[in-house]
């Protein structure tokens, strides 16, 4: 008898639509509860800094300077 595909199997095969900069990004939780990613944390933070507005900093006068500062110049 042929094995039926469950809905879980079908969902695992589908890949989500992602930003081209994050193509190949994968995140998993191992048996110890630790996050395992295919990208370094620095690369993820750089992407988030570039593409996500920080609501806490919007009202600052120097926000544009902070936003446009390259990652290697940060403290």
Image (cartoon, rainbow, N blue to C red):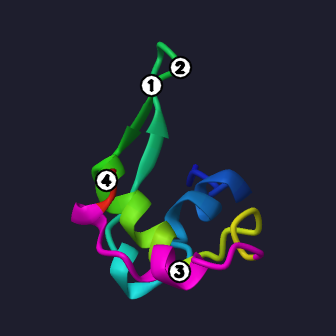
Q: How many marks?
A: 4
Q: Is residue 23 above or below residue 9?
A: below
Q: Residue at x 77, y 75 (%)?
A: 59
- Measured as percent of width and height from the top left, residue 7 is found at 72, 58
Magenta segment, principal secondary structure? helix
Between residues 31 and 37, which one lies in front from this camera angle?
37
Measured Cα–Cα span from mark 4 to mark 3 = 14 Å
Q: Secondary structure at mark 2?
A: loop
- Measured as percent of width and height from the top left, residue 66 is found at 48, 73
- Measured as percent of width and height from the top left, residue 44 is found at 40, 60
Residue range in magenta is 59-73
Measured Cα–Cα span from mark 1 to mark 4 = 21 Å
Q: Secondary structure at mark 3?
A: helix
Q: Horizontal placement of 47 versus 52: left or right?
A: left
Pointers 1 and 4 in contact (C-beta within 8 Å): no
Look at mark 4 in the image and give the residue it sits on: 42
Pointers 1 and 2 in contact (C-beta within 8 Å): yes
Q: Residue at x 60, y 75 (%)?
A: 52
* Residue 60 drawn in magenta: yes
Measured Cα–Cα span from mark 1 to mark 2 = 5 Å
Q: Which of labels 1 and 4 is toward the front?
A: 4
Which numbered dot is residue 30? 1
- Measured as percent of width and height from the top left, residue 72 is found at 22, 63
Between residues 71 and 35, which one lies in front from this camera angle?
71
Look at mark 3 in the image and give the residue it sits on: 51
Look at mark 2 in the image and give the residue it sits on: 33
Q: Is residue 8 above or below residue 72?
A: above
Measured Cα–Cα span from mark 2 to mark 3 = 28 Å
> Sequence-wise, which precedes: disc 4 or disc 3?
4
Q: Residue furthest front?
A: 61
* Residue 17 drawn in magenta: no
């Amino acid at each position: 008898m042929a094995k039926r595909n469950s809905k879980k199997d079908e969902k695992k095969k589908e890949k989500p639509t992602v930003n081209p900069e994050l193509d190949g990004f994968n995140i998993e939780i191992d048996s110890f509860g630790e996050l395992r990613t295919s990208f370094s944390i620095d690369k993820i933070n750089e992407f988030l800094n570039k593409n996500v507005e920080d609501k806490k900093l919007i009202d600052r006068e120097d926000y544009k300077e902070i936003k446009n500062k390259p990652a290697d110049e940060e403290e």
